[in-house]
Image (tube, rainbow, N blue to C red):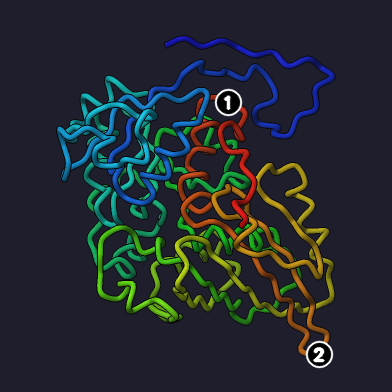
Amino acid sequence: MAFHVVMHPPSQPFLFPCLQQHRVRYSMIKIGIVGATGYGGRELLRLLGGHPNAQLVAAASTSVAGEPLPDTLPAFRKIHELNFESFDADALARTCDVVFVGVPGKASMAPVAALRAAGARVIDIGSDFRLQDISAFEQYYKAEHTAAHLLEEAVYGLVPWYRDALADAQLVAVPGCYPISALLPLRPLIEAPVSSLPVVIDSISGISGAGRTPSEAFHFPEMNENLKAYKLAVHQHIPEIEQELLHKMTVQFTPHVAPLTRGILTTITLRPDAPFDPAAYYECYQAEPFVRVLGAGTLPEVRYVRATNFCDFGWTLDTRTGNLIIVSAIDNLMGGTAGMAVQCMNIMFGLDESTGLRWGGMAP
């Protein structure tokens, strides 16, 4: 594999301290995707098709093995001209520098374990390696974890908080889309004077967050002109959010689904124990390429982050109730899944982490 070392001139400003010196930059990263026909996998295909340092060399699928990728996914004609193949961990490990796994929750344990046993670096955009507590996984996912031996090496892929660990990661667990929308605004506040009362998180997601598999609940006649809450008090992202808040906050998380294709708007309500300025805590994001802190009184909209890797958030202090209200917006398929995954990949291979990701919002 061809690569070279880039030496930055002393006068060049650095945005990312962990990549400041002797950054190893791969000229071309050979990519494999397992589960490329799902919505997350398709978004990866879209991003990788425009990435100057990435080449898709393998796409594995159990349902369309042997079929030309452009026949199954016509959006990628003249972008990805290869055939789908059956899953073969050893072959993928030999051919690819990194393999993305994009299969439904509870289905990635086996392929990820096989890929790691074969020596492949893996980025899992599913849920199976996010939780470090096996009992929490079994409680919320109602399944046995069959690859628990890999949890110790799994790096949680929330880039602003795990950038250093991602550089050498062999297995990355990309966060869930709901958690990303909540954690980016909340994580800096874990040391703020916030009440021990549960933090209330209400999130509204587009229907693509439910995945590609058809179901009556998300059928067009069921969801058009409809809005509903689901999985109250039992959603699998509750332990993930609390884990990444270092168990310093308890959350009351209520997800909703709306008749949107993509996007998440999250409203967070918490009570300060004493007055504080959130802006001071958010200074840690000043150099982050994909976190846009809008500030007090300016609230985000889904349309401004649609098809981007950005998370926008702003806040209002309600002087009547004493509550701090924070609103965030992300695109669940990009900033909440594939974009964060590609950002992790860029760090793993010594690239500028914004490579292939600097897209403005698709509005209108």
Q: Would you say 253 lies left or right of 19 here?
A: left
Disc 2 is placed on an element classified as: loop
Residue at screen point 63% across, 73% down: 268
Query: Label 1 is placed on what type of residue?
Result: Leu
Q: Residue furthest bottom?
A: 320
Please name whichever residue, 256 or 148, is drawn nearer the observer in this view of the structure.
Answer: 256
Q: Would you say 213 lies left or right of 41 here?
A: left
Please name whichever residue, 27 or 362, is drawn nearer the observer in this view of the structure.
Answer: 362
Q: Are marks 1 and 2 in contact (CB under 8 Å)?
A: no
Residue at screen point 50% across, 63% down: 178
Query: Tag 2 or tag 1, which sits nearer the N-term?
Result: 2
On screen, residue 107 above or below 247:
above
Across and down, in percent, residue 328 comes to: 64, 64
Residue at screen point 62% across, 20% down: 23
Q: Would you say 263 lies left or right of 65 here?
A: right
Would you name the residue on which mark 2 appears? 320
Distance (Cα) linking label 1 and label 2: 48 Å
- Which quadrant is the N terminus positioned in? top left
Near mark 1 (Cα within 10 A), the count class, few <14, some 14-19 or many ≥20, is: many
On screen, residue 293 above or below 141:
above
Across and down, in percent, residue 15 comes to: 73, 34
- Which quadrant is the C terminus positioned in? bottom right
Query: Label 2 is placed on what type of residue?
Result: Arg
Disc 1 is placed on an element classified as: loop
Near mark 2 (Cα within 10 A), the count class, few <14, some 14-19 or many ≥20, is: few
Across and down, in percent, residue 154 comes to: 41, 43
Res 209 quadrant in image = bottom left
On screen, residue 121 above or below 108:
above
Would you name the residue on which mark 1 appears? 351
Residue at screen point 56% across, 18% down: 25
Across and down, in percent, residue 132 comes to: 41, 55
